[in-house]
Image: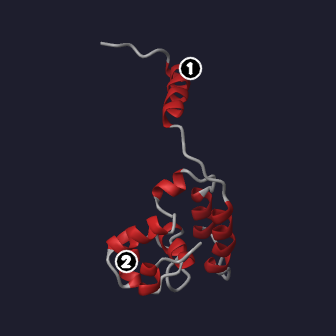
């Protein structure tokens, strides 16, 4: 993954951004949910810079949706790390998995049709007023 000029300017590595924004790893290797504003404050920049970096580094919401990487499980693993286990060290393997995870564009129309079928099985046909 190439580091963008913007990332270089602010001294933000892709790994550090992944840890902070997606995994909630704090600067002291703790855990706390961090929104885009928290992450921006931590790195001394605006939330717009963080948003741009997430897009530039292919780590934005769209990239996660199109990835086979299980971000929810990764977040739980980091949150539940036992005392004495470095969250950053745990995150190195997770980051590697994220980078290697296959990505493909989702077929939203197909997914909506499949969801509608599943809902019909569960709740019955929808009655129109």
Q: Are marks 1 and 2 in contact (CB under 8 Å)?
A: no
**First in sequence: mark 1 or mark 2?**
2
Measured along the vertical axis of the image, is residue 88 above or below residue 99?
Answer: below
Q: Quadrant of residue 50?
A: bottom left
Q: Considering the image in quadrants, where does the C terminus appear?
A: top left
Tell me how the rendering is colored: secondary structure
Query: Residue 82's x, y, as percent?
Result: 66, 74
Residue at x 36%, y 85% (from the top left corner): 44
Residue at x 54%, y 42% (from the top left corner): 106
Measured along the vertical axis of the image, is residue 101 above or below residue 54?
Answer: above
Q: Mark 2 points at which residue?
A: 40
Q: Residues within 10 Å of mark 2 (few under 14, many from 20)?
A: many
Q: Residues within 10 Å of mark 1 (few under 14, many from 20)?
A: few
Q: Mark 1 points at which residue?
A: 121
Query: Residue 110's x, y, as percent?
Result: 53, 31
Q: Quadrant of residue 94?
A: bottom right
């Amino acid at each position: 993954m190439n580091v963008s000029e913007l990332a270089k300017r602010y001294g933000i590595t892709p790994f550090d951004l992944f840890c902070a924004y997606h995994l909630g790893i704090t600067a002291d290797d703790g855990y706390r949910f961090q929104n885009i504003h928290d992450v921006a404050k931590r790195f001394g920049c605006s939330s717009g810079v963080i948003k741009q970096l997430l897009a530039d580094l292919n780590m934005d919401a769209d990239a996660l949706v199109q990835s086979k990487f299980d971000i929810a499980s990764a977040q739980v693993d980091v949150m539940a790390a036992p005392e004495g286990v470095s969250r950053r060290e745990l995150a190195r393997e997770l980051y590697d998995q994220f980078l290697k995870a296959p990505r493909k564009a989702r077929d939203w129309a197909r997914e909506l049709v499949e969801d509608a079928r599943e809902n019909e099985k569960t709740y019955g046909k929808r009655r129109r007023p």
